[in-house]
Amino acid sequence: MFVIASLFGSFEQSMESARLWIHSLLFFIFIIASLYVLDTLVISNRLTTHYQNIQLKKQPQLPLRFRSDGTFKILQVADMHYGNGMVTRCRDVLESEFNYCSDLNTTHFLRKMIHIERPDLIVFTGDNIFGSSATDAAESLFEVFAPAIESGIPWAAVLGNHDQESTMNREELMSFISLMDYSVSQTFPMDPMEQQPMTNIDGFGNYNLEVRGAPGSYLSNSSILNLYFLDSGDRAIVDGVRTYNWIRESQLSWLRGLSKRFQGQWKLTDQSVEIPPFPVMNPALAFFHIPIPEIRQGPIKNIVGTYREYVACSLVNSGVLKTFISMGDVKAFFIGHDHNNDYCGNLEGMWFCYGGGFGYHGYGVAGWPRRARVIQAELGKGKEVWMGVEKIRTWKRLDDGVLTKFDEQVLWDIHSSR
């Protein structure tokens, strides 16, 4: 009996040891499994770059080209003055509108304009954000351009005199804007020979865009409308006097060279097509923020629209108007800055147009609705094919509930003088 009891005791000890060993093994497996799950689901996601999750810029559909109906439409958005969205209140609105008015009104207006006009290009002509009211420039820029990005329409921007007053300088702003979805903006123009950015030109946001002919036409692979974008700067000190900045000679020199290269450059893809008459010098439009001194000096002829605000411009006349006239291809230029001006006028045969104040956080006049400008280039029509650009017209719309369209006019017609 003693032997049996001893054997039974040894067996129990062995079983207890086995149980302890199994428990230890299971605990060890549990620890290993827990560490694996922790590493897979938490740690690796933070320490490892998953290339499949990197979001690249969504590219716009390029090249820009005229529609099959022979039109190319641009929506100009001037002076959005965006701050921090819902918490940023409107300025200069009726007392009955103030309590529910914010930056979101600006966003809603832009969405409505995109919906009703369906532009081929959206152009923001500066003071896109109001720096002193924008806590984070990047966040405000995302909100400013959100409707354009959501639409998938190519869009371009230049800077005004307030954009850099937040958390980014002007170069950082343009670089950031150029990397946003569907943006065709550029920080620097490209050297056509070296295919490198031309960083020796004053400012940030000098570039050009080319618009090709209608699909199926003999000019479908040719640039027939050029769009010039210029940085007009912010502030400057001249002889101890604070003034606005101006477009510099390095920018004008670049523009003259660019225009000269474009003149008469086009390709005929079908040599069997009889070429209808069209201008050898393709027309161009220019976009920038701050008005030039020539507007203040005048005389301005054929004003269409409202001229209710003194022209705020630089003390320095750098010869922008003279340059445009001598180039010959610029048919009109489009500006912002003076929110309460929305008129077009003619200076020495050259048309210019204000966009009119778009943003609700920018100053304005209570009871005077915010507004936007539309520019449309139209092709001439031959017997069977679309020709080159024949006409450039413009109109405006009000944010008055029904988006009233008004002040439609022709800025340039190939069959008449400027």
Image: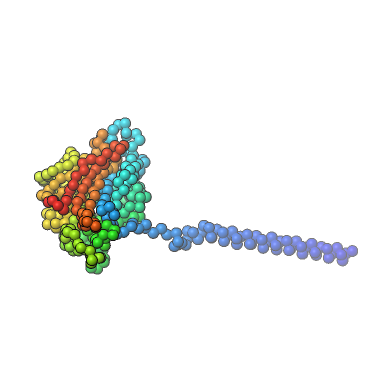
Query: Where does residue 42 sit, x and y in percent of width and height?
Result: 52, 57
**Viewer-nearest residue: 278 or 355:** 278
- The residue at 19%/44% (across/down) is 409
When asked about the image quadrant of residue 280, the answer is bottom left
The image shows residue 67, relative to residue 359, as above or below, that is: below
- The residue at 27%/57% (across/down) is 214
Q: Spot the residue most to the right.
A: 1
Q: How many marks?
A: 0
When asked about the image quadrant of residue 247, the answer is bottom left
Query: Where does residue 302 sit, x and y in percent of width and height?
Result: 13, 43
**Viewer-nearest residue: 355 or 53:** 355
Q: Spot the residue most to the bottom.
A: 194
Q: Spot the residue most to the front.
A: 383
Is residue 161 shown left or right of residue 49? left
Query: Where does residue 192 sit, x and y in percent of width and height?
Result: 23, 65
When asked about the image quadrant of residue 221, the answer is bottom left
- The residue at 60%/60% (across/down) is 33
Is residue 5 something that shows in the picture? yes
**Quadrant of the image for the N terminus?**
bottom right
**Viewer-nearest residue: 265 or 321:** 265
Query: Where does residue 299 sit, x and y in percent of width and height?
Result: 10, 45
- The residue at 19%/62% (across/down) is 275
Is residue 42 shown left or right of residue 172? right
